[in-house]
Image (spheres, rainbow, N blue to C red):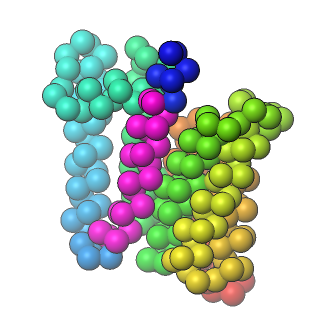
Amino acid sequence: MEQKQSFYKELVRKSIHICSAFIPLLLSFLYWPVIGALLAMLSVYLVSEFLRLRNIKVPVISSITATAAREKDEGRFVLGPVTLVMGIVFTALMWEKTAYTIGILCLAFGDGFASIIGKMFGKRKLPFSKGKTYAGSTGCFIACFIALLLFTKSIKISLIVAAVTTLIEAFPLGDWDNIIIPTLTGAVATLLINGL
């Protein structure tokens, strides 16, 4: 029962991650309004988390946080949504459209599917990764490769960026991978697009 609940929480968390794949599309139409909306949502979340820790529940936000919070986050500030929004915003501000789209897709699909596949099928742990699995890393690579191939139509870019994403995701970075994955893969994409 406890394992099912843990998987359900992970599924909710990573569904939010995967939904962030729509943000590049929104950015292409309404760049600054979307950046502003993300920062406004971040501000509301920060306030709601501080209130939640003082046993003041904010409708909808507190219940989503409670539903998605991992066991290790219970009773503590849940950092994941903060780093998720920061990673998306930093990436969108740092790189041009194709590169930031690649970075955000890697975050959405690579990190999202690594966790879901790892929880479902992961038996063998990666060394020095604090519990990450070979199955999760395989899921990360495949999800990234397919998403990037559909977007870029380039096998070379898709293979290289998917491999970089999988390598970063395998490190025990905690919630900070939400910032590191999109910004670094955006940088790699920029180099590849410019032929360096």
- In the image, taking residue 79 as reference, residue 167 lies left or right, namely right
Q: Is residue 103 magenta?
A: no
Task: Please name the predominant secondary structure of the magenta segment in the image.
Answer: helix
**31 or 135, nearer to the observer:** 135
In front here: 172 or 141? 141
Q: Horizontal and vertical percent for residue 186?
A: 56, 67
Vertical placement of 138 versus 57: above or below?
below
Residue closest to the far left = 59
Residue 78, given in percent of the width and then of the height, sits at 41, 28
Say which quarter of the image contains residue 163.
Answer: bottom right
Name the residue at 57% across, 71% down. 148
Q: Left or right: where does residue 134 sit relative to residue 40? A: right
Q: What residue occupies the far right of the structure in this picture?
A: 127
Find the magenta span and give its range: 8-27
Q: In which image quadrant can residue 116 be found?
A: top right
Mark yes or no: residue 78 visible. no
* Left or right for 122, reference 91: right
Could you tell me residue 129's position as x and y percent?
Answer: 75, 35
Q: Position of residue 144 (x, y in %)?
A: 60, 62
Would you place residue 1 above or below residue 89 in this image? above
Residue in the picture at 53% in, 56% down: 109
Q: Would you say 105 lies left or right of 153 here?
A: left
The residue shown at (51%, 30%) is 7
Q: Is residue 150 above or below residue 49?
A: below
Name the quarter where the C terminus is drawn: bottom right
User: Residue 54, can we see it?
Assistant: yes
Q: Quadrant of residue 181?
A: bottom right
Q: Residue at x 34, y 24 (%)?
A: 66
Residue 18 colored in magenta in the image: yes
